[in-house]
Amino acid sequence: MSGPSAAGGTGTKAKGAAGLLDRRLGKASAQQAPVDQVHEVLTLYRERYGGFTAKHFHDKLRQHHGFELGYTWTKLRLQAAGLVPKAPRRPAHRKKRPRRPLRGMMLHQDGSRHRWLPALEQQLDLIVTLDEATSEIYSAFVVDEEGTTSTFRALAEVIAAQGLPCALYTDRASHYFFTPKAGEKVAKDQMTQVGRALAQLGIERIPAYAPEARGRSERAFGTLQDRLPKELALAGITTIEAANRFIREIYLPEHNARFAVAPEHPETAFVADAAGVHRDILCVQEERVVGNDNTVRYRGLSLQIPPSPLRRHFVKARVRVHDYPDGTLAIFHAWLAPRGDLGGRPGAPRAASAATAPDGSPIDHDQPLAA
């Protein structure tokens, strides 16, 4: 009989039945925590973090409570205590759509209606603008209702901080696109206010035709719906203004540090808007005819044009009213005309005349007739 003898051999076969026993039995695990630490963790969950997912709770333990054990330990303890359910079986693997290689090549923008602020007995819209290349959220805030104004506000925040993106990917909501027949293709030659502004800024509009096409933003909203309301409640936030400040200053930096990924290439496709032209384009623009008393009627308001050195009066003149996202108004006598390019991007128009910015600072050359 060949092979090592039972007496001189090594391994499980040589050791007989004793070799089948797990030699770790009876030894303390390196991951084992004292009973009082287990009790402390479970008490923290019950009294302060109830409803958090195991992963969200584990992040809080590491960030704020000096916890050093791994996520699996936390999850198993919570599941054993009946505080969180076991995760459902994952569906079949799906291949993700490749990301754009550069930051700024394409942004996703979407809104989600949800009870974001638990202190309020109402649902709100959360407007999120994120980068396709990294999933980094550049802008997020809650409003009563999604629409043109919230879109302009979000774009202004992103452009002021990052620059002009190449493209914006959205659903086909009526403030983004005009759709002649429900469920069919959008009419790209019929512009909404948002479409007009994006065209002026040289930003391509890309409509999504299925929820699956907005997968990255949908997954982001899944995470946000799970985490953000709990974070706002934990911080004692009770107003929309305070919620938006918390989201901007505290939540987004932590969220991006946790979930954003590095782009394929470190360069950026954003183009700087050094002249700040976007501030006078990202607004509702409507044409009006000046009345006999040098006033302009606009949405129930009577806007008085003051005396001007440009001409004796503006009676019967065609003017354009700018309605900015912050609620301020301005009146222009001439249409903005293309001139040169904007920050080096070919074909993008630049304003020949511009208004005072919503914050009161001057923009470019001519001032509006009234603001």
Image (tube, rainbow, N blue to C red):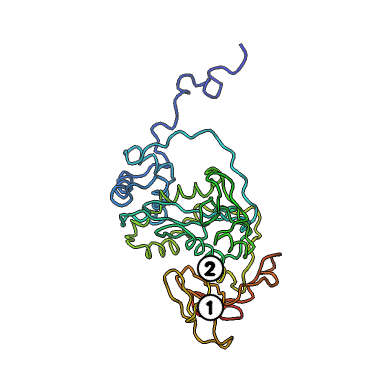
Judge from the rendering whether residue 321 lies leftward or rightward of residue 199; answer left or right. left
Classed neighbour count for the residue bearing mark 2: other residues with Cα under 10 Å, few (<14), some (14–19), many (≥20): few
18 and 278: which one is in front? 278
Residues 217 and 251: in front is 217
Q: Which disc, if any, is residue 119?
A: none
- Residue plotted at (49% across, 50% down): 220
Q: Does label 1 or label 2 sit earlier along the sequence?
A: 2
- Mark 2 secondary-structure assignment: strand
Instruction: Judge whether 117 appears above or below 290 on screen.
Output: above
Q: Residue furthest top?
A: 1
| Residue at 55%, 79% in the rendered image | 368
Tell me the residue at 28%/50% (across/down). Answer: 47
Q: Nearer the viewer, residue 55 or 64?
A: 55
Q: Residue at x 49, y 46 (%)?
A: 219
Q: Where does residue 364 sit, x and y in percent of width and height?
A: 60, 78
Mark nearest the camera among 1 and 2 is: 2
Indicate the secondary structure of the residue bearing disc 1: loop
Q: Which residue is mark 2?
A: 286
Please tell me whether residue 125 is drawn above or below residue 307 in the rendered image.
above
In the rendered image, residue 237, in percent from the top left (x then y), is placed at: 34, 61
Q: Amino acid at mark 1?
A: Thr
Label 1: few (<14), some or many (≥20) within 10 Å? many
- Quadrant for the N terminus in the image: top right
Q: CA distance from mark 1 to mark 2?
A: 17 Å
In screen coordinates, is 241 left or right of 176? left
- Residue 244 sits above or below residue 276 on the image: above
In this figure, which residue is indicated by the disc labeled 1? Answer: 356
Residue 317: x and y, percent?
A: 56, 77
Q: Is residue 276 above or below residue 149?
A: below
Residue 124 in percent (x, y) is at 39, 55
Nearer to us in this view, 109 or 25: 109
